[in-house]
Image (cartoon, helix red, strand yellow):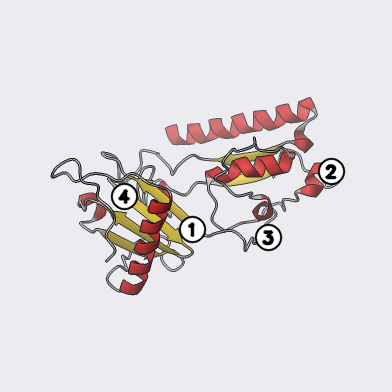
Amino acid sequence: QAFATLIEGMDKSLGDLLDHFDALGVAENTLVFFLGDNGSDAPLGHQHAVACAAPLRGKKGAHYEGGMRVPFIAAWAKENANNANQKQLVIPPGSLQTQVAAVQDLYPTIAKVTGAASPQGHAVDGVDLSKLLTAAPDDSRDQVFLMHYPHSPHRSDYFTTLRDGDWKVIYHYIPSKGSEGERYQLYNLASDPFESTNLADQEPAVLREMVGKLKSGLETHQALYPVSPDDGKTPLVPVIP
């Protein structure tokens, strides 16, 4: 009942915003992004089970997809096919986009849609989402997502994940009960979106390639690593199997 009340309240608040845009006369020129900042955090089910983020496994803070994926809806506040801005960015109603994107892509997208320029010398991490919002594929986009979480304690301790297309690898710096005692977890998200079958032993070549890419990505970004619990100083750099 409490969860349903929260959903109803969120729906009412969003509706109020859209109505207000309309009352101000700006709805047709207002692009709305509706998304979460992390996976679901509802107090339902175990943190590594298929529960509150079903059908995905895990929740906020977990190394599984339920802790990383978020709902993302983009739409004009009030559709008008004759509106000049909407002609520049046509978002088909009810369309679905399955390519990988991340929250850092919002900044360059907003800059592109509004015609704003980034300050000179300002580093931009994301990539414009405009083409994806039209429901068209964007072959220029890199389908790689790297997430580094060298912290503890939380729902998953000391991990890095890399998704490259359909494959996803999870590297655990200190194997524990939370990692099912494994250092490596490998999943094919196309055939196993629920991350139920660890393919690390069955696909050694894929595992080696994925961990290599993961390690290379961390080096490129000059990532910091957790340290050895033995001396509290030695960085735990990922080991390629």
Contact check, label 4 and label 3, Cβ < 8 Å: no
Identify the residue at image location x=76%, y=39%. Answer: 78
What residue is shown with label 4? Answer: 159
Indicate the position of residue 213 as horizontal and vertical percent values.
Answer: 40, 61
Left or right, 76 with respect to 14, comes to right
The amino acid at mark 4 is Phe
Kindly state the secondary structure of the residue where label 2 is placed.
helix
Contact check, label 1 and label 4, Cβ < 8 Å: no
In which quadrant of the rendered view does residue 171 lie? bottom left
Q: CA distance from mark 3 to mark 1?
A: 18 Å
What residue is shown with label 3? Answer: 136
Q: CA distance from mark 2 to mark 1?
A: 34 Å
Q: Nearer the viewer, mark 2 or mark 1?
A: 1
The amino acid at mark 1 is Val
* Label 4 neighbour load within 10 Å: few <14, some 14-19, many 20+: many
The amino acid at mark 2 is Ala
Indicate the position of residue 197 as horizontal and vertical percent values.
Answer: 32, 65
Q: CA distance from mark 4 to mark 2?
A: 46 Å
